[in-house]
Amino acid sequence: SEERSLNFIEEIVEQDISAGKHGGRVHTRFPPEPNGYLHIGHAKSICLNFGLAKKYGGKTNLRFDDTNPVTEDTEYVESIKEDVRWLGFEWENELYASDYFDKLYEFAVTLIKKGLAYVDDSTAEEIAAQKGTPTEPGTPNEYRSRSVEENLRLFEEMKDGKYPDGAKVLRAKANLASPNMHMRDPLMYRIKHAQHHRTGDKWCIYPMYDFAHGQSDAIEQITHSICTLEFIPHRELYEWFINKLEIFPSRQYEFARLNLNYTVMSKRKLMQLVKEGHVEDWDDPRMPTISGLRRRGYTPASLREFCDRIGVAKRENMIDVSLLEFCIREDLNKTAWRRMAVLDPVKLIITNYPEGQTETLHGENNPEVEGGEGGRDIPFSRELWIEREDFMEEPPKKFFRLGVGLSVRLKHAYIIKGESVVKDADGNITEIHCTYIPESKSGNDTSGINVKGTIHWVSAQHAKTAEVRLYDRLFRVEDPSNEEGDFKEYINPDSLKVIETAYIEPDLATAIPGKGYQFIRKGYFTLDKHSSTDKLVFNRTVTLKDGWVK
Ligand code: ATP
Ligand code: MG
Ligand code: MG
């Protein structure tokens, strides 16, 4: 892609490098919580973190932020690794916040010993009430003045499983009068008797996000810890823990999360769509997940290009999904192989073409590439399938397709002229009869006839069949999360259209999984993961042009 100016995070990194901070080292991390599949918003964070390291000769860790045992699972860990690799990035270290549970426990003990943390027996409601309001300071309770010895004993007993869930918490003794509510003695640990996907039942106390994230960054000596804007109010606490613990001074920087219109982008909401059967699974081609986009036919290059084009913002904004579609169109235009497929077929009979005769025509794979990247044979015969919409019995002016009395070129083949139609009892056209001009063969046309239109076709006797799935936006409003009521009320009922029997040229029977194909005039398609030699299934990645009407 073209040269662009530095984004504000690159500016910070370049300043740090020239100031010799951390010896000019750049070390980032991508920290997903393994509680769902990654979405395109995560792709933005991945491209940013891995992109910075790549640009400045640094490293990026993949760190699973797995401090909440109830929601996390190894299924998600595996899918996250697959998605990051597929996007084209390789991490320096595969790490888990849960690997630091011992170390984090030690950090907590250190703070207790410094008089900077205490065990609190209050309920969640009491703690919330005692925190005050943004205009009123919080009030200390009786537990805040517990002795260091008592806190050490109680915290150890919490760890040893002496108390039920919710009976006690460990809190930082920070500043109950701080204008920043996050500084008002935030929770560090809570009791949760739950199985963890990696540590099993070793622990029954788990650190809160704020006590785990910065410390994990410091343990890994992360230089630039990049997160989204909602963490701005957490930054003071991030630095407070690091300063009090006197550990590696990682720094947090915030950028605006990616919001895309006509979809939702929170794992919790995406999970609901899956669990309640609104979509097939996390990788349903309508989902904004990386696995869904992959199955739909998006390429890693197109997603990286999209992330690059939207840039790194300091303010929340909404990105139009048509930009994403533009990026995949641009990529597939360069790489997809051209084929012919008829999605809404009607029979075309060339009355002056000999019955029983077949000839083999040739089409290049990719006209965008010098030499065409090879090509394929296309059988031609007397009876073809064409698109119903490419014919009109009584064509209006400027209809440059086939009509009675109107001529058109069959792609890679001959010029034909519409002659007559056959209809069923209801008046539907069942056959179109035409004549062809033998001297008009593509590449060797001596007919001297010019026609305006070219249509695609498939030889009826040679055609294979396929199921073709056409997708539209999953939601009918731009920002379903911001509408009244439940976001699921705004699901687009027509987001999937299945064509049970499309006719495709025979070469497509050996289509390559993961490869993009342009079905001429119909869009870009790719094999679905459920496609088999017995039943071919294609997903439409995107149309050739932006056909959305608001
Ligand atoms: P969600 O709300 O969708 O579950 P999350 O932030 O809870 O997202 P994490 O697994 O914690 O999900 O995210 C891993 C990283 O990806 C974090 O650094 C987070 O800031 C970043 N991230 C998540 N969503 C977006 C987004 N829409 N745009 C940019 N970055 C994002
Ligand atoms: Mg998170
Ligand atoms: Mg989340």
Image: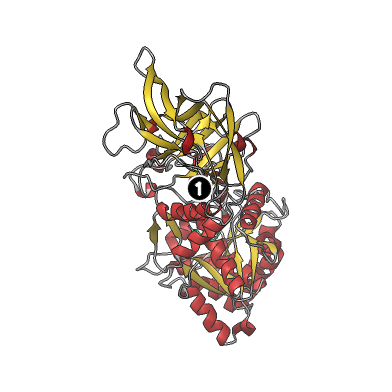
- Asked if residue 377 lies left or right of residue 547, the reply is right
**Residue at position x 31%, y 45% in the image:** 550
Q: Is residue 179 left or right of residue 305?
A: left
Residue 526 lies, in percent from the top left, at 56, 42
Q: Nearer the viewer, residue 497 or 160?
A: 497
Of residues 403 and 113, the one nearer the viewer is: 403
* In the rendered image, the vertical position of residue 339 relative to residue 201, given as above or below: above
Q: Total marks drawn? A: 1
In the shown orientation, is residue 425 left or right of residue 351? left
Q: Is residue 221 visible?
A: yes
Q: Quarter of the image holding residue 490?
A: top left
Q: Is residue 535 above or below residue 238?
A: above
Q: Is residue 315 above or below residue 12?
A: above
The reply to whether residue 67 is in sight is no
Q: Which residue is mark 1?
A: 268
Residue furthest to the left: 397
Viewer-proximal residue among 547 and 453: 453
Q: Secondary structure at mark 1?
A: helix
Specify the amino acid type for callout 1: Arg
Q: Quadrant of residue 426?
A: top left
Task: Check disc 1: other Cα within 10 Å, few if <14, some if 14-19, many if 20+.
Answer: few
Image spot of residue 81 (x, y percent): 65, 55
Residue depicted at x 46% and y 22%: 351
Residue 94 rendering spot, x and y as whole percentages: 69, 62
